[in-house]
Image: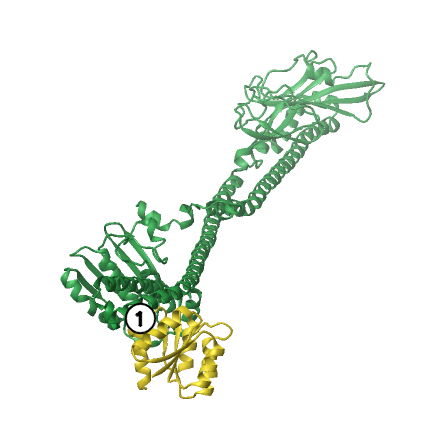
Amino acid sequence: MRVLLVDDEEELVATLAERLDMRGITTTWVTDYRAALAAVEQEEFDIALLDVRLPEMNGLDLKRLIAERRPAMKFIFLTGHGSEEDFKACSAETGREYYLIKPVQIEVLMAKLNEIAQC
Amino acid sequence: MHERLKRFTPGFLDHHDQSSGMYKSLFNFRQLWKQSIVTTLAVVLLPLFTLTIVDYIISKNALESELLLRTARLVSNTRRTLTSYFDERKFALNFLTLDNTYDQLLDEQRLKHLLENLKSGLGEWSDLGVIDHTGIQRNYAGPYPLQGMDYSSQEWYQKLSYTDTDSYHETVSMRSNISEVFLGFRNTPHIVISVLHSNILGLDWLHYVLRASLDIDRLNNILSHTEVSGNGDAFLINQKGIIQTPSRHYGDIMKKFPLAVPPVSDRTEVVEGLDHQGRAIVTGYAYITGTPFILMVIKQKDNLMQTWVSTGGKLLIFLAGSVLAIVAVVVGICTYLVNSIYQADQKRLASLHQVEYANKMASIGRLSAGVAHEINNPLAIINEKAGLIKDLFTFRQEYAGDQRLIGLVESIIASVERCATITRQMLNFARNIQVNVQKLSLKQVVDDVLEFQTKEAGYRSIAINVDIPEEIPEFFSDRGKLQQVFINLVNNAFAAMKDGGRLDIKSRLSVDGTQIVTTVSDTGCGIPTENIKKIFEPFFTTKSGSGGTGLGLSITYGLVKEIGGSIDIESIVDKGTTFIITLPLDYHAEKGGTHARTVG
């Protein structure tokens, strides 16, 4: 399973990537939307884990851009904010309730990834 | 009794506004009530009283002047009758002097005959006498031996007798005198009429007087048949104030009239005053010309005003009744109006407080969402770093044996998880997930919730009593949120109670049938009054140190609002707490949405 991690908090995203690597998941992490788009151009991913609040472009818009390039990719949104708009938007974007609230336990994240991979 | 009275006392009478400030006087309902009653009564009653008083004065004056007028008319008519009475008798005597020569009159038989003739017409004549110019009675017909009587020294004779020094007045060819009433020899009241006759006999003037006595019965008749209203009295007095004909109220004949003799006047006069017994009277009088008599007509004013007084009394009772009715109506209307204003104001205050509270909760919601978000990111980093350390310990053999380090990391992760629970609850409080409305049965929801709790209840011997009657219909609401509400409240109740407590869940329809009112009561420790106000605020907790986040009830509050209901609390320390949840029967998701947004 190849996963793209996008979060502006480098400390968070790098650590998370390392932990997922330890669990046998191939990860690439970036901290802004340009790098994310570039990564998608270069490699193939099964799943993208996107922060909703990103600088310059939010996670939802970024998801649309990525989905145009890679229609088969699936998405999980990570959010630190519990606003109604965020949740509604996340569900609308993924067609399912694929969103997680930070901080997320690694077991919960793994379960979600496996669930999506099997869909 | 006191309690029953209290039920009918409008609420504003006991209202004491705690607040103070510029417009405080506007909310002094008691004063408003008093002012409106006084003003309305003044506006209504003042014209009524003014009209009543004016009308009283006008009608009294009209009646009095009518009374005076009637008295004046009566006096003047009676006076005319009396004048003609006396004139007739004077003319009768005068006719005798003209129809008979002096010599004829001196004839005893002739005089007797004339007296008989007079008597046959008018029985009142009692004697007849002829007195010559020297004052000696020359002839007499009557029951007394008065022949040769000398009258020259008597006042009446002196007034009549003609002396040579006087100039004879042509127009008064007949000079006459009418005496006052006196008793005389017969001891019966009578008057004497004297007529002076002057005649040229050859070259000399012949003067003599024809004198007759009359009983006053006829005179009495005239006066006693006069219709005097008001227990009145018509009689004659002389100018010295001696009563001349019988009076009903002012003394017997020949007695002194108890009141002052009225002043001389040519005309009929009417005056008001008091009599000797202090009674209000109307006195009409007239001097009867050519006689010593004054006609008195005295009416007692009280009697005359009797009808007016009794009518006035009835009107006064009517007025009092009207005033009572007006006062009752005005007080009733003012009380109703002020009470309506008071109740409207109370409702306004209540909704103001509600809005204030909702706004406060909304601000807290926004704040907690912001705080949760800001903390979540660093928390996530701590979580991942600690997780990585743990992963390293777990996946790499060189650290795996160090249990103490793994314990430390797990402790960090546990603390992070605890923080995450708090921030998630904060977000829960703030956020509004789409409401999922479905038809549901309240009893089913409550039973589902209690299913999880029966074990703990049994363990702690807490009695659970559910009373949700059959008539509570199924209604539309969000099952998940409703369940959450009951879970929170039941947990809360369990936490408040010692072992062996009692939990009651009861439902009923509201009075208007549009809402379901559910009460969740426990027999726990209760909540002090000062805490009740803060009970729904986030982070308010009394369970210090026991891991309570203080968010349970604030989330419950938010959930109830989201599904269009309201929650209230009643609590008595050491007795227990009752939560009252009111839910609409016809709930619409859109409505709930607006509620929720103010919170989120």
Q: Chain of mark 1?
A: A
Kindly state the secondary structure of the residue where label 1 is placed: loop
Residue located 72% across and 15% down the image: B158
Q: Residue furthest front?
A: B398
Neighbourhood count class around disc 1 (C-alpha, 10 Å): few under 14, some 14–19, many 20 upward? some
- Which residue appears farthest toward the right when viewing the image? B203
Q: Is residue B302 above or below residue B195?
A: below
Q: Quadrant of the C terminus of chain B?
A: bottom left
Residue B172 image offset from top left, x and y in percent: 78, 25
Horizontal relation, residue B87 to residue B494: left or right: right
Q: Which residue is mark 1?
A: A105
Q: Looking at the picture, tell me which residue is in the foreground, B591 or B73.
A: B591
Query: In the picture, residue A119 is in which quadrant?
Result: bottom left
The answer to whether residue B470 shows anywhere in this view is no
Viewer-proximal residue among B76 and B48: B48
The hue of chain B in the figure is: green
Rendering coords of residue B135 (x, y %): 71, 14
Rendered position, B29 above or below B151: below
Tell which of B169 and B198 is nearer to you: B169
Residue B582 in the image: x percent, y percent? 34, 64
Specify the amino acid type for callout 1.
Gln
User: Which tint is chain A?
Assistant: yellow
- Percent x, y of residue B599: 42, 64
Answer left or right for B315 relative to B566: right
Residue B290 showing in the rendered view = yes
How many labels, in total? Answer: 1
Q: Is residue B296 left or right of residue B265?
A: left
